[in-house]
Amino acid sequence: MSESNQVREADESRRLFERLRANMRLSIKGKDDVIDQVLVGLASGGHILIEDLPGLGKTTLAYALARSMDCDFSRIQFTSDLLPGDLTGVAIYDELRREFVFKKGPVFANIVLADEINRATPKTQSALLEVMDRAHVTVDGISHPVGEPFMVFATQNPVDYEGTFPLPESQMDRFFLRIHMGYPEEADEIDILRTARIGYDSIPARPVATREEILRARAAVAGVFVEESVLRYIRQIAAATRTDPAFRVGISVRGSLALKVAAQARALLQGRDFVIPEDISGQVVPVLAHRLALAGARLDALEERRETGEALRRLLAAIPPPT
């Protein structure tokens, strides 16, 4: 692709994400950094886990994203009695046709909201592994593609352990980003109290992006240039996590690749067709923290998340970025 085409695609993608950002701001007040991380995940073609306390807008964020795009959306409320077939679909015998016909489950959508994902049993959670990794579902030996774009937007409460099943490391590794909302600032909370209503039907977002535009933006991410010294910077960060005594398990190659793609997406969101070191450092915590295990077990998930983030930032500060 010529340099002029890359610049044009970067500019088109920037305008697309500006529309999405402005649309989501109608529902999500004072959380531009969170919105940008969601858009990084969307542009990267990755899945997002949002982990925070109840009532801070996790599900509203997912609805705001889904309603900003002209795409299929489904919401799955995860519970302990949910079965794998309830997600993926099942083969049902058709009396008229005298054969089994596959009935698609709710994962057959462009944006899938997996609400309170850790309330489902490990067997049901594992039903998502294939579709999150390969964007298709296999039932009775037959593969069914779910379509593109495809994105799982999962939420979970990090403090309520009653009736929950922690996500295994293999499942966590399938999530491209882990983010959290946090409490709003005073002015933003007052604005929410003044204008917002309870209920997702009141979300004012409307479609401002088509399926084809999202796919073109995702294709443009791969064309964002990453200089050799920046690649070495990524590798240094990953290697440091593998030797740092704070971590029991370091970053895998999958994690390194995810950091590179997230940095490319971040550059594209800002209208650049090349990655700078700040793109890397800005994505380290949301991309890598949930892929790491601390050397000592923590009973409190919020404390573990905080300590992991601090350890990553300390590690990052000790590695000089490329000039």
Image (spheres, rainbow, N blue to C red):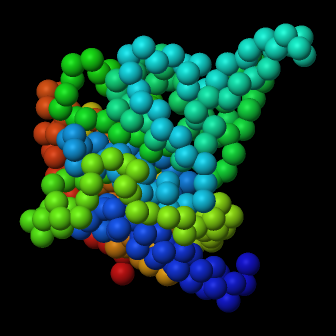
In front of the other: 40 or 311: 40
Q: Position of residue 171 (x, y in %)?
A: 44, 31
Q: Is residue 89 above or below residue 70?
A: above
> Which residue is rendered at x = 21% and y = 23% of the image?
161
- Choose top left, top right, bottom left or bottom right for residue 316: bottom left
> Which residue is rendered at x = 56% and y = 83% of the image?
11
In front of the other: 241 or 36: 36
Is residue 162 found left or right of 43 in the rendered image? left
> Which residue is rendered at x = 53% and y = 40% of the image?
74
Is residue 156 found left or right of 276 in the rendered image? left
Q: Position of residue 277 (x, y in %)?
A: 37, 73
Q: Is residue 39 above or below residue 47?
A: below
- Quadrant of the snapshot with the N terminus: bottom right
Is residue 73 found left or right of 176 in the rendered image? right
Q: Position of residue 93 (x, y in %)?
A: 79, 11
> Which residue is rendered at x = 38% and y = 21% of the image?
79
Is residue 148 found left or right of 276 in the rendered image? right
Q: Is residue 267 visible?
A: no
Q: Position of residue 105 (x, y in %)?
A: 62, 29
- Quadrant of the snapshot with the C terminus: bottom left
Q: Residue furthest right?
A: 97
In front of the other: 205 or 178: 205
Q: Is residue 217 above or below residue 111?
A: below
Q: Residue furthest left?
A: 186
